[in-house]
Image (cartoon, coloured by chain):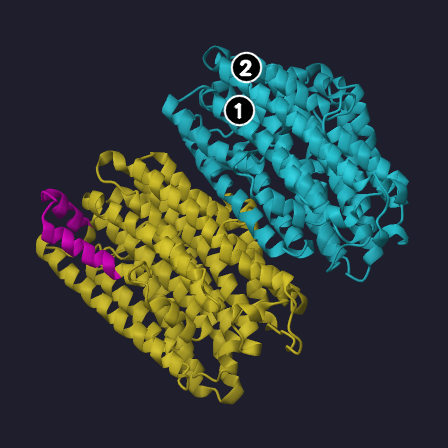
Chain colours: A cyan, B yellow
Amino acid sequence: MDPNTAGWALVVALFLPLAGAGALTLMPASMDREIRRAAVAITAVGFALVAAVTASFDYSRAGELQFTTDVPWITAIDARFSLGMDGISLPLFFLTSLLTLLCAIYTTKPLPSPGKPKAFLSLMLLLQTGMAGTFVAFDLILFFIFFELTLVPMFFMIGMWGGPRRDYASVKFFLYTLFGSVFMLVAFLAIYFQAGANSWSITELSNMAPFGSTTFQTWAFLGVFLGFAIKVPVWPFHPWLPDAHTEAPTVGSVLLAGVLLKMGTYGFIRIALPILPDGAARFAPMIGVLAVIGIVYGALCCLAQTDVKRLIAFSSVGHMGFVMLGIAAMNEAGIQAALFGNIAHGIITGMLFFLAGSMHERYHTREIAVIGGGMLKKMPVYGVLFTYVAIASLGLPGLAGFWGEFPAMWAAISPGLGLADSYGGLYLGLVVFAAIGTVLTAGYFLWLIQRINLGEPTERWANEPLADVQAIEWVSWLPLLALILALGIFPRLLFGGQDAAVTNLVGFLGG
Amino acid sequence: MQIDFIAILPEIVLTVTALLVLAADLALRGDAKQFVNPLAAFGTVGAIVATVVLWGSERVTFGTMYVVDDFAVLFKLLFLGTLLAILGISWRYVAEHRFFQGEYYFLLLTSFIGMMLMPSSRDLIMLFIALETVSVPAFVMVGMRKRDLYSSESALKFFLLGVLSAALMLFGMSMVYGFAGTTDLVGIAAAISGETASVPLLLGSVMLVIVGFGFKISAVPFHFWAPDTYAGAPMPVAAMLAVASKAAGFAGLVVVAFIAFEPVADVWGPMLGVLAVLTMTVGNLIALQQRDLIRLLAYSSVAQAGYILIPFGLARTGPEAAVVNAAAIEAVVFYLIAYAVMNLGAFGVAIAVERRTGLRSIADYAGLSGRSPLLAMGLTVFLLSLGGAPLTVGLWAKFAIIEAIAVDITLFGIVLATFLVVNSVIAFFYYLKVVRTVWMDQAPAGLPQLQPGFNLSAVVVVLMVGTLLLGVLPGLVTDFSSVISIVAAG
């Protein structure tokens, strides 16, 4: 495939899941097994195509858009159907495709009540189109559509297959994110009219930036900020997250943590920063403060959780805090760290949610106290995997988690855009608190491992036959486990690919 | 006076159809009476053809009282399309409830003739006639379920408030005439702009005229009739009131506000903006409490009227106002088209469920997905679209309004946008409540199978496809730069 001309590959990879969702709904519901296999086949074909795109991506020109498509879409408002990918989009696009494939494989196991794999898998495929599209859309309107498209399937996933408080969690998730994104839409429109170029193109608007007065930039950034900050979520916009993550079915949690949250940080990096650099510079210290509050707050909340899944959900608040800290640094190293942290968190926390889901299937509870330790004795392989992923999540050097956290702090010591002069002390303080956050993070994960893995199985579980890791689980987990290690020892896999694109982006910031 | 018969051909076709329907009803006996429905539908299609050929031309007749331009044609097509859909959802409903079918269809067609006149009117008298032709048949239709006290009550309520508003409006019109010395809208604009424009009595009478339309579009605080009337009326009539009659009110409001009263737009603009805020907020907050789907849809349609009023709040006067006013009118027209598609669909599904079971509380929709996947899917799409979810036309409708606000950002515009955003979120809360019930709750045992029938299913499917198709390609109807020619006339 020639990355200059093969725009079709992206279009096909994007809409194949949608077509697949349509095809699945036409299959009779009685063909249960066939439906699950068809979903695996569809996502596998999609992943093969994305893998081919990844292979033929021209890494020497990672800063430029490749695989582009650009045709008029809604002429009345100048919106265009404009797709493309550069070094920033590629890893996220790849991750989306990979995680959906793994989720489809995982779904060959029984679904939680009410079953209905047809509806579930159709929604998942619809969700995939929305998620993947967000990362390759280069028109603000198109971006917004894809961004919003994820809400409806995720709402149904949580609301129909979720835990006991699913009604509450699904509505909360939907309303929170909707609230932010409508403000974002208003800001997009303001940007469009202020730029006056009759274009929604992200590239064009970035090239034109900065435009408008500082007041305009501030207000527009505020609108965009609300949309993305709720999605990330940045503290204090996070209350939807623990509920949604905890109540969602395993696959829903994996995709939420693995991809949906990344849409927020990606939006910051792709849209908010380059198009509104002045607004970004004004907001950066505040973002930094919120990010660090998120890190510490997330860790403290984790220490207080009694439910494994809820604990992992709160850990996301902390990890995304590190990503936001990287963004707040407004320099090349910071953006690099943020993007790395994005991917690392997606892989690690996605994997943790897989593990939490399987744990619930075996113990039928997620209460740490009820599980009560001894998992290493009861299910040795499973216990080892859990330890491995938890340690990756707390940021042990040599595993993927480290490369998101440490460089983010490193970058924040010398923030770009002249922030070092005016806010140098503040940023230094932020780094100190973030470092305390890493200690707390290590603390709660190690404590979790101690409470669940170590010790003797309690009386209740001692004689229960609990199955260790099954074949299906191996298949759907192995790629993630391997990636955690690979990215940990060879971070250049990601840093290298992103480098040129990030340099471009920081160029827009004028830093 | 030369009369341009081509210009009024659609109305003539509808009138002839209405009379034929009445005559056919006399001739037919028993079950055969229901075949007046296809007869009416046939006439509607004829009227659509007669309207389509008028697109792109500008015809003026009856002096300058009656203008057929693209603005009018678009509205007429909207009304006729709505009529066709209402005929589709009426057939079985009306046949089974043993109404006087001939009368029902005759009144329905008559009401739509009034609507057809509305966007073409360029004269206060003409506007009033059009408005009354819409309303009077509607009073009767609301009370058609004669043996039902509820229906009679709602008809009486609707009638009394309707007459009151008509009286107020007529009073306002008479004073406007006193000032301007003419009932011609363009003439009024010229006369008003000649005045210093701050004569309190003049502004008061302008308000009275606008308030008259406020009843028609059920804007807060003139909305009290709407929920009771929708709930008591036969359901196809409720659908007509919620969609067509409201659209007609907006057509009239656009004409009178942007042509006759354009010179005092800086007075009625902010006032309608405040009304918009009140209307959407009150409508949404009360809708949150509803347990009956029709009442929920009624309050939701009050809230939707609030959204449609927002662009009126942006209106300005003066030479540089044309851009803003044009964007405002475009937003109104597009929202009305979108609203008609999605709201008719929602009512269609409600009729399909109620017709068979007589159930209309939201709890009765539990497990609809198992009983009829088509209707469940339809209701989901329509409600999400009313909320403004992506890939549905509802999103673009809201988009059009925000776009109109963003053309020239003012503080008031930002306030309006904020209210729109907050209200959209509130609205989703109750739309999702229904959607959740439909998909996620268990159906109670022993409910009969749903058989919506071919016509109703077809209407639901067509509207659903329309909602989604326009959701992906809003360009199919967004390009009507020609409809805003009305601004230049002002």
In terms of sequence position, does the residue under pointer 2 or pointer 1 come before the other? 1
Crowding near the residue tagged with mark 2, few <14, some 14–19, many ≥20 C-alpha atoms within 10 Å? many
A208 vs A146, left or right, is left
Tell me residue B355's x, y (percent): 54, 76
Tell me residue A454's x, y (percent): 83, 38
The chain carrying label 2 is: A
Residues drawn in magenta = B186-212
Residues marked 2 and 1 touching at CB (< 8 Å): yes
- Identify residue type, mark 1: Gly
The chain carrying label 1 is: A
Of residues B117 and A253, which is closer to you in this image?
A253
Q: Secondary structure at mark 2?
A: loop
Q: Give me the residue at 40% from left, 63% from top.
A: B244
Of residues A4 and A357, which is closer to you in this image?
A357
Q: Give me the residue at 56% from left, 52% from top.
A: A171
Q: Is residue B24 above or below residue B64?
A: below
Q: Which mark is residue A288?
A: 1
- The residue sitting at the bottom extreme is B29
Q: Is residue B99 above or below residue B196?
A: below
Provide the major secondary structure of the magenta segment.
Answer: helix
Tell me residue A475's x, y (percent): 86, 40
Quarter assignment of residue A309: top right
Of residues B364 and B372, which is closer to you in this image?
B364
B195 part of magenta stretch: yes
- Identify residue type, mark 2: Pro
Give me the C-alpha separation between circle 2 and circle 1. Answer: 10 Å
Identify the residue under disc 2: A415
